[in-house]
Image (cartoon, helix red, strand yellow):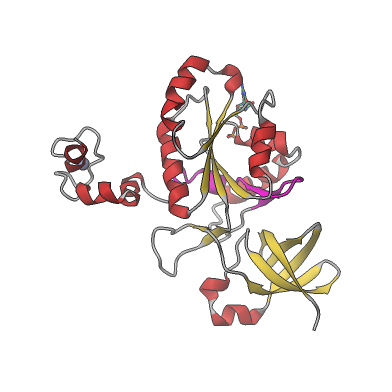
Amino acid sequence: MNDIFEGIVERIDANLSRVRAGDALFNCEVRKKLFRYDPLKTEIAVGDRVRFEIIGEGTGVIEEVLPRKTRLSRRAVMKDAEEQIIAANIDQLVSVSSAKEPRLNTRLIDRYLVVAEKHNFNAIICINKIDIADTNELKMQMKPYENLPYEILYISALKKTNIDKLENLLKNKISILSGYSGVGKSSIINAILPGAEIETEEVSAKWKKGKHKTTAVTMFHLPFGGYIIDTPGIREFGTLDFNPKEVSHFFPEIFKAGKQCRFSDCTHTHETGCAVKTAVA
Ligand code: GDP
Ligand code: ZN
């Protein structure tokens, strides 16, 4: 019996998982018996902490998937067998917006905060493109967030402003970068990790062909420790996984009051006969 090592799955290609243990990388298969016992539990995702046996130069066999701290899945709302795990053990979600071009959309920030709460991820609010921002307007827009228990970062990927602060927050964590296209996610990754862009494009091409069976998501290993996940698959989720109408389900008070609204698809904003607005009043 060889020694058993512990590592993190940072990439999955077909049946091979790339596992990192410190600075060493291993291409690992999964011990068949793992699937026989509990296929749901042993489905492997990036971010999984695994125990593996080394069987050759840079190769190994995964013997055990350790319990997941958090999980991101395609059917996160439903607890049924269709749940497909996209990534495990994500520590935090970085909601990326731009101050301008595209203009700041605070409702999107709100959604990401809800997504993070729901998944038990820590949330970081990151505002990019401060080099072209109207500072006063930005201050006003961001005022409501200043009293919330979230870190807010104002950065410029282009001018490399406050990138070091972002790096500090990413250090030794598994983070997911989310935000609309054009806000500067790729630029941020390039500022932190020159050369990562190539891989981003590869993944993107794969997704465009609609290979939804592949759970493949790549985590970028950070030279100072930790990982960032950024794939179009996750980017394009917008709210990551659920429909805006479901959002209120994660605010129990709203959900309860909302049952009394006149319209079943009430957004609790402008409708007449909205029980949520009445309750707030
Ligand atoms: P992504 O779609 O979120 O990955 O966004 P990109 O990284 O592709 O950036 C979209 C556009 O915004 C590009 O033209 C970038 O050059 C530009 N951009 C990114 N970061 C900054 C920034 O900090 N300041 C300014 N002025 N432009 C930026
Ligand atoms: Zn309502």
> Which of these two is toward me, 135 or 240?
135
Residue at (68%, 45%) from the top-left corner?
171
User: In the rendering, at what x and y percent does residue 279 appear?
Assistant: 19, 41
Residue at (78%, 64%) from the top-left corner?
26
Count of marks, rendered view: 0
Asked if one can make out residue 15 in the rendered structure from this viewpoint, the answer is no
Residue 110 left/right relative to 225: left
Whether 220 is among the magenta residues is yes
User: In the rendering, at what x and y percent does residue 95 appear?
Assistant: 52, 39
Farthest residue to the right: give it: 57
Residue at (17%, 44%) from the top-left corner?
263
Quadrant (top left/top right/bottom left/bottom right) for the N terminus: bottom right
Whether 227 is among the magenta residues is yes
Residue 44 left/right relative to 121: right
Q: Which residues are magenta?
A: 218-239
Asked if one can make out residue 187 in the rendered structure from this viewpoint, the answer is yes
Relative to residue 116, is residue 26 depicted above or below? Answer: below
User: In the rendering, at what x and y percent does residue 96 appear?
Assistant: 54, 35
Relative to residue 131, is residue 162 depicted above or below? Answer: below
Q: Quadrant of ligand 2?
A: top left
